[in-house]
Image: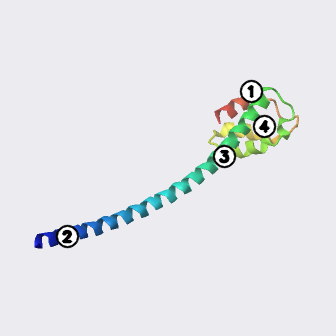
Amino acid sequence: LKEAQAELKQLEQDLGGAAASREEAKAALAEAAAIREKEAAAYAKESSEHKTNIVALKKAIDALSKGMTGFLQTTAVSKLRQLTIDVDLSSADRDIMSAFLSTGSSDRYAPQSGQIVGILKQM
C-alpha cells in the first residue's frame, strides 16, 4: 500500500511537471507564431516593393531598347531615380544614370541608351 501511495505521489508530481512543460510549449508556440506572422508581413511588403521595382526596370529597358522617345516624361522615371539611389551601383554607373534621368528632352544629353540599358539590366 505504501509503495502504491509513493508511486501515486510520484506520478502526480510527474503529471504536474508535464502540465507545466506543456504550458511552456504552448507559450513558445504562440510566440513563434507571432514572430512568423510579423516576418511574413515584412516579407510581403518587401516582395511587393521588389516586384514594383522589377516592373519599372522592365518597362524602362523595353522602352529604351525600342528607342522610345519621351521616355523621360513617363512615371517609370521617378522609380528609376529612386532605384539608382537604393541599388548598389558603381559611382560611374550612378553618374551616367543620373545624367540620363536628369536631362529631360534637352539637347545637352548625348544618347547612351545602349549603356543605360546595360546598367538597368545589371540592376
Say few, some or many: other residues with alpha carbon within 10 Å of mark 4 (under 14 / 14 to 19 / 20 or more): some
Left or right: 59 in relation to 32 = right
Q: Position of residue 13 (x, y in %)?
A: 24, 70
Disc 4: which residue? 100
**Front of the two marks 4 and 3:** 3
Quadrant hosting residue 118: top right
Residue 117 in picture, x, y percent from top left:
72, 30
Q: Identify which residue, 30 or 8, lies in the foreground.
A: 8
The residue at which mark 2 appears reads as: 8
Q: Which residue is mark 3?
A: 48
The span from disc 1 to disc 2 (Cα, nearest Å) is 84 Å
Name the quarter where the N terminus is drawn. Answer: bottom left
Q: CA distance from mark 4 to mark 2?
A: 83 Å
Cβ–Cβ under 8 Å for marks 3 and 1: no
Q: Residue at x 83, y 35 (%)?
A: 71
Instruction: Tell me if mark 1 has few (under 14), some (14-19) or many (20+) residues whose alpha carbon lies within 10 angstroms of its own.
Output: few
**Which residue is identified by label 1?**
114
Of badges 3 and 1, nearer the viewer stands 3
Task: Identify the residue shown where x is 81% and y is 29%.
Answer: 111
How many angstroms separate mark 3 from mark 1 (CA)? 29 Å
Residue count near mark 2 (Cα–Cα under 10 Å), binned few <14, some 14–19, many ≥20? few
Q: Secondary structure at mark 4?
A: helix
Q: Single out the residue that lies furthest toward the left.
A: 2
Of the residues under marks 3 and 1, which one precedes in the sequence?
3
